Image: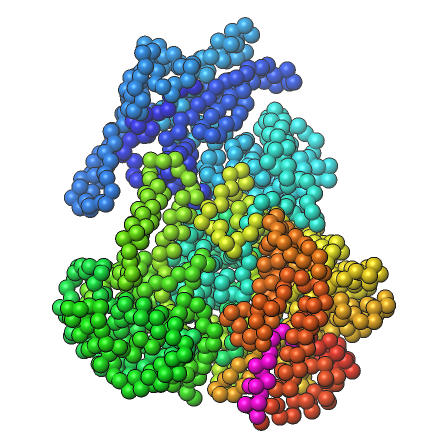
Amino acid sequence: MVNSPTKSEACDCGGSELPKPKFVKKKGYIPYGLIYKTQDEFQKVGYWIPGVAVTAKITKVEKDSSTNLHLLNPWIYTVEATHGRYKWTVFKRYADFAQLAKSLGGHRRLEQIKSPFRRARNKIEMSFQDIDQETKDYELQILEKGKELGDFGTPRTDTDSGDEPTSNGKTPDSPEEEVDEDDDGPPRFPLLPDSMISEVHMERRRVQLEKWLRHALTEPVNRDYHQMAEFLEVSRYSFINELGGKHKEGSMKKRPGGGKVYIGCKQFCVKWILPWMERYLILKDSYVCYINSNETVRLVLLFDEQFEIDSPDVVTSTKPKYMFLSNASHVLAMKLQLEDEAFYWKAAIRQVLESTGQVWLKPKPFGSSYPTRENQYIQYFVDAKDYWERAAAMIELAREEIFIADWWLCPEIYMRRPMAEGNHWRLDNVLKRQAEKGVRIFILIYKEFELTLNLNTVYAKKLLQKLHPNIKVMRHPDHYFGTGTFFWSHHEKLLIIDQLIAFVGGLDLCYGRWDNSTHVLADLGSVQYAPTAEGHTLTKGLASAVEEMASEVIKSDKHVHEGEEQDNDDEEAEVSHIKHEILDETGHRIGKTKTSIVQTSREEDEDKKEENKNEPEAKEEENNQRKEHKRTFRDVMSQIKARKASPNKRSRSPTPFDNVPKSTEKPANVKRTPSGPAGITADLMNPHHVRSPQQVIRESPFGKPKTLRWHSVVIGSDPSHSPGPLDEPKSFDVTQSTSSITPTKDKGDKLPLKKIIHEPKNRTVMRRVVSNLKTNRNAKRWKMLLDKDKPEDVTDEYVINYCKVQETEVDVSGLQGAGKLWPGKDYVNYLVKDFVDVHEAYSDFIDRYRVPRTPWHDIHSVVYGEVARDVARHFIQRWNATKTEKHKNNKDYPYLLPKSYDSVKVPRVFINKDTHNCDIQVLRSVAHWSALIDGKEDSIQDAYVKLIQNAEHFVYIENQFFVSMINSSEVTNEICKALCDRICRAHREGTTFRVYVLIPLLPGFEGDLGSGNYSALMAVLHWTLSSISKGPHSLIENLKINGIEKPFDYVSFCSLRTYDELCGKLVTEMVYIHCKLLIVDDKYVIIGSANINDRSQLGMRDSEVCVLATDREFVPSRMNGKEYMAGKFASTLRKRLMKEHLGLLPEAFHKAPIKPSVVDLDDPVHDSFYHDVWWKAVKGNTEIFEEVFRAFPTNLVSSKDELVVWRDELPMAEYNPDLARHHLKKLWGNIVQFPESFLSNEDLAPTIMTKEGLVPSAIFT
């Protein structure tokens, strides 16, 4: 082995003469993101890891006795190469060494000619740089000039590497065996071929070749030459970080074609017509790929259970030079140059398959393509609010790649609401920011059949791809005749970041999905201030005098100079800039923008807390506050200024702000303010606001509650962005830390912004010491993360970015709403009208003042580490299949490579109190059309069925559909049969077993049940009722056939319904359940995109992805009154859902009439909960909604004629609203009974006279 190269040696012969590349490698490793750089960019810095030596040793020389074809080169040399942590072996003959020596000689002579010109060009460039050199905030390091090309022929004597030579002339890092150099130059290459050397002299020949090769590798001019890379079987993909180990690479010829799935007539006879093509094959930990002469990946062959070498089913030639590799999607036929090359290749592949590739060849549970990953982390999200905020924050942390796969994607949705930061958190802006940082973004969207769906995904594709070249979007499938893809869709909902973080669940990033646990029905867009627990609001004078008083405050604060510092103990005012811009339904501004500038004292917070303790004086405070409404904003500000000028800074006179205490808890009873008929102004005059769905305290994107003191809401317009109701703030950068707001004075701001520092009045010396310790600790943490001298760890970037995002929070507790929470197309009622003109994001298509929105209930999850790698592998398989089918020769859409599993590190900052430790497995539904595989995978259905069959106590299901029948030829998935068999077994054994099923009251399709027109809504409802209770194939009827007279003692079918007030009128609407969730025995959880129907479960139809989590952590619980160890993740999720449905959450809209602590949710099996709580709430809520609203569907209606009469009756909500409100107070949350007997006397099946009857029934099942 040889020494590591010195600084001068590490440079090419041109040294610093070479033009500086647009990117740099990091010392010790090559970043993964460089795989997307061009060949020219990569070759400028070479294939080798910076600062790491390359060594080579010939370990064996043996004569090839298997053939007589190599007369001049009968000896094979085994060369072991080492480069950092990478070690590999190549097999060469003397002819290979001779060809390398010849190429290196020619390369050296060419570089001698180029060197003077390169030096001259470099001097000219450096002179221009010196003229206009900018001051840098980091230390400028001057490197010593590298050796000239002519110096490479002399013996090496310098020690620029920093290592002092020892007495024997070797550096401390030198190996035991050095390259012995003659006095007159480097080792000479032996000229005689092996055939002219006797066998006894072959050891000397081995030493000669080894010395020559090792010396050549010490010279960058030789080492970085592409012929040396080819000799050592090195390419640009060899040493890239996270791509896995260095195994074997080499040139070969491949036969065209090879796909197992027919993707068009272009495959016809292609393998017999086109010539064999020269390619470069690369073997990695879990796949084989090959690149062309431009080093562009042209195919990725993933290891799977069908991967074979020379499978008898695909071999078409028995010649020794041929090699055939096959997996579930492709057959790669190759021809090597020599017979021994084929032998070495097969041996290398078998060696990898027996090590890192073995996991992919073994059968996995449930027939999945992915193994169960032990000791992984998972977190759930109920409803879109928490998921979207977490996803937006994680996107900000992306370093290399972002993968998105959605059924529908809308770029103009807001990931965080209320939209107080303008368009900063709009999805297209979030992705654009990352793309500008160099992150590659790949998006797969389902390509809809436009005659049936109005998703306009081509608009989303064009909008996203024009944002930045790093954003690539593909739609699939193309609906050609004969492909059979008209009816099926890509239904996954995936967001994958750096193949390390993966969001999996039922939520698309599209319109209509954002919601929280309150599920409000109305959104009229009023700007509201945060109410308190006592119901106090800001004064009427603040709204009426805001425009006049702003200028007065500005005049009075001119004495505040820029950069002025204040003592922490002084009374400091809190400055809030609030710009009110009135918008109509289309997002256009009405009237002038009003600016409020509010100053409050930090001492007022303490006084507010003290006043809140006085509960008996609540009424008196409310009356006082109403009187204070008459005071103007001028009085308020004058009092604050007078108090600042007073010597006694602790004394002050009361202000109207004293009656507005800050609350650190979520409001228990917050009301929404109805806007006027035109929806123009906010009702700030009424001290009693109606309920608002938002929380007073904004949580950080990582789930930790965070309350900051800086209040600033800027609402303006920016023509550079696509039109929206809110634009990016201009007054200050919302992505900066709140602590970094310094006293600056922009041209557009008349009032300087001051850094606000709040300290409580009772701040003690001990508390200050603790605070200083915390500050020092944080400073040390940043210093540790930013330390450049320590070994490089790629997880550090995540930690640093995490800390930065944590500090970019802006407090929006002062304003609730900030416009509409559901702007434009986000406000939807699926039963009333389906989406239209989706390219007009902020234009309403539903009348907000007459029609309530449809709330959306859904579940999502996030996984990390190896499981995220598995989810990314699925996306990569789908992306590469789509590229092969649609963009095979388009360089703008690259093939993707999966990362290695050998060193997956999950930063600790990702793990919080809501993250749980589980064994997790990825499940799929894929087939030939969706993933280009020969066959299908239905591991989701297999997991559902087996978990239900083996359930001991209960099964909990939330799903968008329940279309599963028993012994039916039309619906063949076996979930319903598994439920029936398990309930029958419990009945026979006399054990207690419960099944909870929650589905929507009605399918989410446009249609009117009372009209004479048939629709898709009626078709899906027909199959749903036929699966539950109607007909011989239904669950209820089969239970009765098996002797169970009271099937609802075992199974409950429920739905969700809520109510609200819209323009003073009581309204009700179903909460649309879109979840795809299964919980079994509080131990097993399946979360994903798969519905309970044939489309999602059979594998041949829609493509789906789910994750199965098996708990590893357990907590004491009970099952049917007995002690039981419940899984922490499963039980926490189930109880969280039941609390929401029963109105037991602190922020619940329809709170249960009893205290949450009284309800025992630990035991979902015992009669005390199943009958006395669950069924009691279900039946009671159902009766109240039917009595107050005449709600339907209902079991009280069995025919269409009865439905007409039911709908015509005047509901209590209209003829006696006060009595209706009294009844509604008795509601237990939103849970209601699913009407399994609704329209039981009607045949809802589509007829041949309807368009639904003309298409196959498989579309609806």
Quarter of the view holding residue 465: bottom left
Q: Is residue 74 above or below residue 1100?
A: above
Q: Is residue 1224 magenta?
A: yes
Q: Is residue 271 magenta?
A: no
Split into 4 quadrants, where in the image is the N terminus? top left
Q: Is residue 1108 above or below residue 307?
A: below
Depth check: give the residue in front, 722 or 643. 643
Identify the coloring: rainbow
Question: What percent of the width, then of the height, locates residue 1167?
Answer: 72, 67
Q: Is residue 805 above or below residue 84?
A: below
Split into 4 quadrants, where in the image is the C terminus? bottom right
Q: Residue at x 23, y 59 (%)?
A: 568
Depth check: give the residue in front, 85 or 467. 85
**Residue 591 in view of the camera:** no
Question: What percent of the width, then of the height, locates residue 1003?
Answer: 65, 74
Quarter of the view holding residue 382: bottom right
Question: What percent of the width, then of the height, locates residue 542?
Answer: 29, 80
Depth check: give the residue in front, 976 or 952. 952
313 to the left or right of 573: right
Q: Residue at x 68, y 40 (%)?
A: 362
User: Bounds of the magenta span?
Assistant: 1216-1232
Q: Residue at x 25, y 71 (%)?
A: 599
Question: What percent of the width, then of the height, locates residue 1243?
Answer: 77, 80
**Residue 190 in view of the camera:** yes
1132 to the left or right of 3: right
Most extreme residue toward the left is 559
Count of marks overlaid on the render: 0
